[in-house]
Amino acid sequence: MTLRLDSRIPPGPLAEKWNRHRFEMKLVNPANKRKHTVIIVGSGLAGGAAAATMSELGYNVKCFCFQDSPRRAHSIAAQGGINAAKNYQNDGDSIYRLFYDTIKGGDFRSREGNVYRLAELSVNIIDQCVAQGVPFAREYGGLLSNRSFGGAQVSRTFYARGQTGQQLLLGAYQALERQIARGGVKMFPRTEMLDLVVIDGKARGIVTRDLVTGAIESHAAEAVVLATGGYGNVYYLSTNAQGSNATAIWRAYKRGAAFANPCFTQIHPTCIPVTGEHQSKLTLMSESLRNDGRVWVPKKAGDKRDPRQIPENERDYFLERKYPAFGNLAPRDIASRAAKEVCDEGRGVGPSGLGVFLDFADAIKRLGRAVIEERYGNLFEMYERITDENPYEVPMRIYPAVHYTMGGLWVDYNLMGTIDGLHVTGEANFSDHGANRLGASALMQGLADGYFIIPSTIGNYLASSKLEKVDASHPAFKAAEGEVAATTRKLLSIDGKRTVSSFHRELGKIMWEYCGMSRNEAGLRTALKKIPELRAEFWRDVNVPGSDAELNQALEKAGRVADFLELGELMCLDALHRTESCGAHFREESQTPDGEALRDDEKFAYVAAWQYAGEGKIPILNKEPLVFENVKLSQRSYK
C-alpha cells in the first residue's frame, strides 16, 4: 500500500503563506498546555531550541540525548556562520534572494513553500540569538558583521569567529537549562532512543536504553519530535562526531515513517585530507576560509615541489578559472567535484595526491596577518595542531569529505512525518535543502525549526487531535521493549571474530567508492550486491564483548552499525533509481558536455519518499511532485 503524501503547503501568495497558516492553525489554551507532554529526541540546535521554547510555552517536555550533556551535541562543530537576509551590507540581499539562492543551490529539488519560510524566519533568528547574548562578530562601529559563503553573491552570513555553532548552541543551551531548572523540561542524558511506539497510527512515545546502566525504559507522550541530526557516518569517515548516528530516524522508518531522498548526501570541499587507515573521522575546515583563501593545484601533473616554490604562471586556480562569477565560493557540490577532477588528472597535492591547496598568501599580503588571525585564528590553530603545518606560511591542504545529509525523514509543511504526531526537525528531515545545501544554512534551518516552527505546528496537531490517554504500561510499549531487548541479546550472543568497527569501515569504503562524489549504474549495482553480503556477515560474525547491564560502547556502536548496514542499501537503491544528476547526486551517465550535473525535470522533479515494506522486502517508492510557481526551472550555472 502506497502512502498519501500531502505536503500541506498553504494556498496563497508565497510571501503570505506562513503568516496566514499561523493564523489559521488551532491553538492550545495556556492552561491546557501543561496537560500535554512532548518528547524531544536530540538536544542540538533544533532539539535544544524546540525543548526550551515548548517548555517556555507551558508544555511538559522530556528531552533525550546520548551525550553526557546537551552542550556536546554535534551542532557545536559548525564553524563558519549562519545565513540571514538582513541586508545589513546593503548589497542587494532580500528574503526573496535568500529563497532563490537556496532553491537554486539545492538544484531545484526542494519545496518553494518550505524554503521561503526558512528565508523569512532567518531574520528573526539573528534577533533571537543577539538577545540571548550570542557574541556575533561586529565591525569597528559595533554593528554586526557579515561575510560571504558558497553559492551567494551577497554577504549575508553572521558569524562568531570560527565557532559559530558552539556559540549558538550555548545560547540554546542556556535557554534549555533555564527550563530544566524551572521544571518544565526533564533532561535524560546518556540515553539512546531505540524504538518509536505507534498506537492507532499515532506516535505516542519511545523506548530507550540508559547507556550507563543498560536499563530499557518506555516514555509516553502526545507528540514526538526527532531532532537527531544526519546520517553521514554511514560512510565511516566523515566530518560528523563519531557518536552521530541514524538509529532514531531509521527505527522510525521501520515503524512507518517515509524516508525521503536518502541518496542526497553532501560532500564538503574543505576538509583535511585522509592520512591513513588509522583514522576514524575527518576534520572540517570551514567554508568561510574560501572568502580569503584561493584554491589551486600545479598545472603540471606530478609536481611535488614546495608550493612556495611554484610560480604563479605554473598554478591553476581552477575554481576561479571554471566559475569566474563565484570563484572560490562556488557551491559545495560543484567545488568538490572540481577538486576530484584535478586530482584524478594527477595534479593533486600531498603524500596521497588526494588534496588541493587553500592558499592565504594573497590575503595576508593584502590585509595583513592580524586581520586573517582575527577572522580565522582558531581554525588556523586547529589545522596546525592536526597537520603540524603553519597555514600562515604554507598553503593548507584540503580535500572533499562527507559532511551533511540533505535526505531524511519525509515531513509536510508542519514538519510532521507520515506517522501522525511524529515531527522531525533540522538535519533529520529532508525539507529545505533539496539536492545540495548552501553553506551556513544548516544552523539557520535547525534554529528556524526549533524556535519558530515546531512550537506553532505541534500546538495545531494537539488542538486538532483526539488522543486517548496512554502511559508506558500500554501493551504497545511492552511489545517494543521486548523487541529492543531481543535485538540486544542477539548482538551479544553472536560471539564472532570481527569487531564492529571493521564492519563499519568496510561499509564506508563501499559507500564512498560506489555512492560517493560520483555514482554510476554499474557501481551502484555492485554496492547493492556487496552491502547485503556484508550485513549477513555482520549478523554471523560480529563480536560484541561485555553485557547489556553496564556501560558498553561496543554494544551501542553495534546497534548503530546494524542500522547503517540497512540504510546504506536504501541510499544506493535511491541513487540507482534517480538516473538524473542533481546537486550533490552526480550520475556519471547524466552530465553536460563540460561535466556539470544534468537534471531531468520531466522525469525526476519529485521527492522520492521510501516506505518500509518489511524485513527482506524491497522498499516502496512514493513520489511527491515538486511544483514551481515562483521560480523558473533552469540549468544551474555559477559561471
Image (spheres, grey):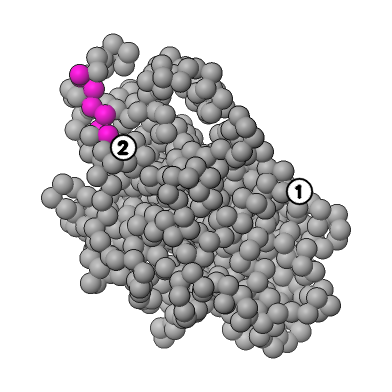
Q: Describe residue 24's horizontal placement relative to residue 186 as left or right.
A: left
- Who's the residue at 24% across and 14% down the image? 311
Q: Main secondary structure of the magenta part?
A: helix
- Left or right relative to 538: residue 316: left
Three-letter amino acid code of the residue under disc 1: Gln
Magenta segment range? 313-320
Q: Which mark is residue 174?
A: 1
| Residue identified by numbered label 2 | 327
Q: Position of residue 56 (x, y in %)?
A: 78, 63
Depth check: give the residue in front, 7 or 231. Answer: 7
The residue sitting at the left extreme is 593
424 drawn magenta: no
Q: Which mark is residue 152?
A: none
Q: Is disc 2 surrounded by few (<14), some (14 to 19) or many (20+) residues within 10 Å? A: many
| Amino acid type assigned to the residue bearing label 2 in the image | Gly
Disc tally is 2
Secondary structure found at label 1 = helix
